[in-house]
C-alpha cells in the first residue's frame, strides 16, 4: 500500500493563478480531509469528505474548493491564489467511524507570490 | 469549542533520558486521541491512537496515557535517542457542531542531544 499520496511536493504560484493539489489513497477509506499548517497556527481543517459525492467545509474553507468523484481521490482547488494561502497542505484519510486512526500524506508546500 | 494545548513548546534533553510530553484538551467528550511525529519538512507519522475508553497504549519505547475526565494525555519516551528529535503533535477527535473534528495542539519540538 502506498497509503496517502500528494502531488506536487512543491509549487510556486503568482497571485490570481489557479491550481489543483492532488490527493489519493489506496486504503479504501471513506473519510478524507485537507489541512493547512502555518507557523504558530498549527493544523487547521479546510474541507472534508465522508464519501464519494459528499463534501463539507472545515474551519478555514474560504478560497478553496473540493469535490469527491471517487473513493480514492480528493483534490483541493485554489481558484484564485492569494499570498495568504502560502502554507503547507496535508491530506489525510481514515477508515469508517471517528474511532479510526488518521493517516496523513507527505504534504505540498505552496508559495504564492 | 475544543482546544488542545501542548506543554512545553520545546524541550531539549541529553541522550538516554526518559521524558514526558504533555497534552491537555478542554472538552472531555472525545472519540479518541492520537499522537503524531513530524520531522522537519515532512508529513505526520502516527505514533499511537488511544480510544476514549482506553487508559494507555504502548509501542516500543513509547507509552501514551489518557485521562479523559481531567482532559489530559501524556506521551512517555523511554531512553531517548537523537533519532527521536522531531515535533510531536497531539490531536483529539471530538464532536463539535454536529460533525466530528480532529483538533490539533501546536506541538512540542523535541531535541535529543548526543
Image (cartoon, coloured by chain):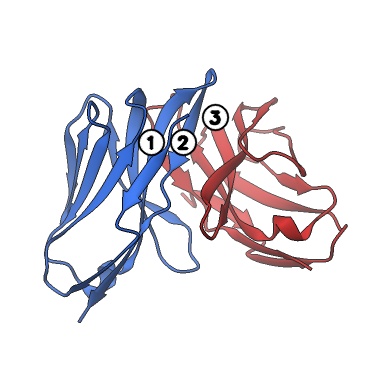
Chain colours: A red, B blue
**Contact (Cβ within 8 Å) of mark 3 with mark 2:** no
Q: Is residue A12 above or below residue B72?
A: below
- Out of A91 and A26, give the one closest to the viewer: A91
Task: Give me the chain letter of mark 2.
Answer: B
Extreme bottom residue here?
B114
Q: Which of the 4 image quarters holds residue B85?
A: bottom left
Task: Name the residue rendered at 34%, 41% in the picture.
Answer: B34
Q: What residue does disc 2 label?
A: B102
The image shows residue A77 at horizontal and vertical percentages of: 76, 46
- Out of A75 and B16, give the one closest to the viewer: B16
- Out of B42 and B76, give the one closest to the viewer: B76
**Contact (Cβ within 8 Å) of mark 2 with mark 1:** yes
Q: Earlier in the sequence, mark 2 or mark 1?
A: 1
Tell me: A69 left or right of B9.
Answer: right
Tell me: B42 left or right of B87.
Answer: right
Question: Is the residue marked by circle 2 packed among few (<14), some (14-19), or many (20+) residues within 10 Å?
Answer: many
Task: Give me the chain letter of mark 3.
Answer: A
Q: What residue does disc 1 label?
A: B92
Question: Real-space Cα distance between discs 3 and 2?
Answer: 16 Å
Give the number of the mark in front: 1 or 3. 1
Helix, strand or loop at label 3? It is: loop
Question: Real-space Cα distance between discs 1 and 3?
Answer: 19 Å
Helix, strand or loop at label 2? It is: strand
Extreme right residue here?
A16
Give the number of the mark in front: 3 or 2. 2
Task: Name the residue rendered at 23%, 24% in the picture.
Answer: B53
- Of the 4 image quadrants, the one containing the C terminus of chain B is bottom left
Q: Which mark is residue A30?
A: 3
Amino acid at each position: 500500500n502506498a497509503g496517502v499520496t500528494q502531488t506536487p511536493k512543491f509549487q510556486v504560484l503568482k497571485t490570481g493563478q489557479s491550481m489543483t493539489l492532488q490527493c489519493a489513497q489506496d486504503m479504501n477509506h471513506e473519510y478524507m480531509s485537507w489541512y493547512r499548517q502555518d507557523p504558530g497556527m498549527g493544523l487547521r481543517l479546510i474541507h472534508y469528505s465522508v464519501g464519494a459525492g459528499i463534501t463539507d467545509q472545515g474551519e478555514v474553507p474560504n478560497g478553496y474548493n473540493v469535490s469527491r468523484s471517487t473513493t480514492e481521490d480528493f483534490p483541493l482547488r485554489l481558484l484564485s491564489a492569494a499570498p495568504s494561502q502560502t502554507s503547507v497542505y496535508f491530506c489525510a484519510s481514515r477508515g469508517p467511524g471517528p474511532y479510526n486512526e488518521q493517516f496523513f500524506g507527505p504534504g505540498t508546500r505552496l508559495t504564492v507570490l | 469549542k475544543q482546544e488542545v494545548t501542548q506543554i512545553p513548546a520545546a524541550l531539549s534533553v541529553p541522550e538516554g533520558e526518559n521524558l514526558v510530553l504533555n497534552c491537555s484538551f478542554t472538552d472531555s467528550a472525545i472519540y479518541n486521541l492520537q499522537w503524531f511525529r513530524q520531522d522537519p519538512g515532512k508529513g505526520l507519522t502516527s505514533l499511537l491512537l488511544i480510544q476514549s475508553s482506553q487508559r494507555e497504549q504502548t509501542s516500543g519505547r513509547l507509552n501514551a496515557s489518557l485521562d479523559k475526565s481531567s482532559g489530559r494525555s501524556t506521551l512517555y519516551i523511554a531512553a531517548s535517542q537523537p533519532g527521536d528529535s522531531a515535533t510531536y503533535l497531539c490531536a483529539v477527535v471530538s464532536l463539535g457542531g454536529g460533525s466530528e473534528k480532529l483538533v490539533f495542539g501546536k506541538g512540542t519540538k523535541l531535541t535529543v542531544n548526543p
